[in-house]
Image: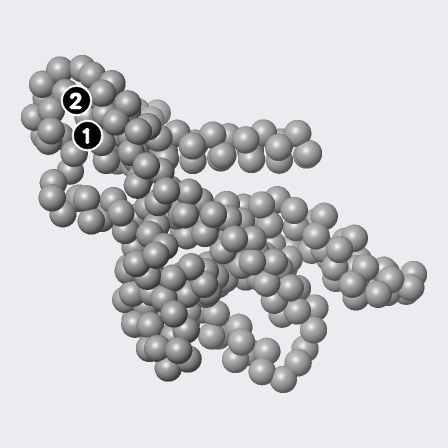
């Protein structure tokens, strides 16, 4: 009975997560203006997607924003996690608690708060407002991921490095970064995915001159889900799958 239940349970989990994506990819080849009516097989929506300059511009904006946000969030998060793990300073517990608060705060609350702050600071809505916002909500995920990985490290390594004359900067770049490299890469990929996927916070702080892909898809979906949107989402899924497989290959080769 256990041999039968285990494969059934695993199959159900995989179907629950990936069957909707497979349906989306399937209907991206639908020869109809609306996805729920199957009219036949066609690749016209992918051809239309290639020639749609507005969608490609939004996609480039999202990728560039996600790359910058993930890079800054991972860099700041690595320093923050290292500081929380190695040092005892005033306000350490408050900082650690505030990270959990940001992690558990609803997106609509964070988006409203950021919008009010940018308005009071006279910061124009657009790329920099989006970048700061995406760094803010990606940072807690990075810090917690790296901090949990650092807790498994032996603190005697850092003491030995100090005894050999290494400075804090040398310890960070020569010891901590190499030991945390898999977690750093995972944090970067997670931050990039979160930035690429965000709608709620971006809706509050985006400007008319810098449109990103999630908001573009959201505006198009209001008129009905068309196969062109399915084709775009299918391409995004394939790109994400390639990135994940590449990262796993690099980590396995490194190990």
Q: Judge whether residue 216 can be spotted in this image.
A: yes
Residue 228 occupies quadrant:
top left
In the displayed structure image, the side of residue 75 where residue 131 appears, left or right: left
In this orientation, which residue lies closer to the viewer: 28 or 54?
Answer: 54
Q: Which residue is mark 2?
A: 30
The residue that appears at 30% across and 48% down in the rendered structure is 214
Q: Residue furthest bottom?
A: 90
Instruction: Report x, y in % for residue 126.
Output: 38, 62
N-term mark: 1 or 2 = 2
Instruction: Report x, y in % for residue 251.
Output: 62, 35
Label 1 crowd (10 A; few <14 / some 14-19 / many >=20): many
Q: Judge whether residue 5 can be spotted in this image.
A: no
The residue that appears at 30% across and 41% down in the rendered structure is 54
In this orientation, which residue lies closer to the viewer: 85 or 219?
Answer: 219
Q: Secondary structure at mark 1?
A: helix
Q: Secondary structure at mark 2?
A: loop
In this orientation, which residue lies closer to the viewer: 210 or 163?
Answer: 210
In the displayed structure image, the side of residue 160 where residue 209 appears, left or right: left
Q: Residue furthest top?
A: 41
Label 2 crowd (10 A; few <14 / some 14-19 / many >=20): many
Q: How far, Cα to Cα, is label 1 from label 2?
A: 7 Å
Instruction: Report x, y in % for residue 219.
Output: 20, 49
Q: Are marks 1 and 2 in contact (CB under 8 Å)?
A: yes
User: In what quadrant of the picture does the N terminus appear?
Assistant: top left
Q: Which residue is mark 1?
A: 227
Q: Residue furthest right?
A: 164
């Amino acid at each position: 009975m256990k041999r039968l239940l285990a494969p059934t349970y695993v199959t159900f989990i995989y179907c629950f997560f990936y069957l909707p994506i497979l349906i989306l990819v399937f209907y991206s080849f639908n020869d109809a203006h609306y996805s729920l009516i199957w009219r036949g097989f066609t690749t016209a929506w992918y051809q239309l997607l290639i020639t749609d300059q507005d969608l490609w511009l939004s996609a480039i904006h999202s990728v560039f924003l996600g790359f910058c946000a993930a890079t800054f969030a991972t860099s700041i998060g690595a320093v923050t996690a290292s500081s929380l793990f190695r040092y005892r300073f005033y306000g350490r517990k408050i900082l650690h608690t505030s990270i959990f608060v940001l992690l558990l705060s609803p997106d609509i609350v964070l988006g409203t708060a950021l919008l009010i702050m940018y308005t009071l600071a006279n910061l124009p809505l657009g790329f920099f407002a989006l970048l700061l916002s995406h760094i803010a909500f990606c940072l807690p995920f990075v810090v917690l991921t790296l901090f949990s990985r650092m807790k498994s490290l032996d603190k005697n390594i850092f003491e030995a490095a100090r005894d050999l004359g290494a400075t804090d900067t040398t310890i960070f770049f020569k010891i901590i970064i190499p030991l945390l490299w898999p977690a750093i890469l995972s944090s970067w990929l997670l931050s990039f995915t979160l930035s690429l996927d965000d709608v709620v916070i971006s809706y509050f702080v985006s400007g008319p001159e810098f449109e990103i892909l999630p908001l573009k898809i959201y505006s198009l979906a209001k008129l009905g889900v068309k196969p062109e949107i399915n084709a775009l989402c299918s391409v995004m899924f394939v790109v994400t799958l390639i990135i994940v497989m590449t990262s796993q290959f690099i980590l396995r080769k490194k190990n």
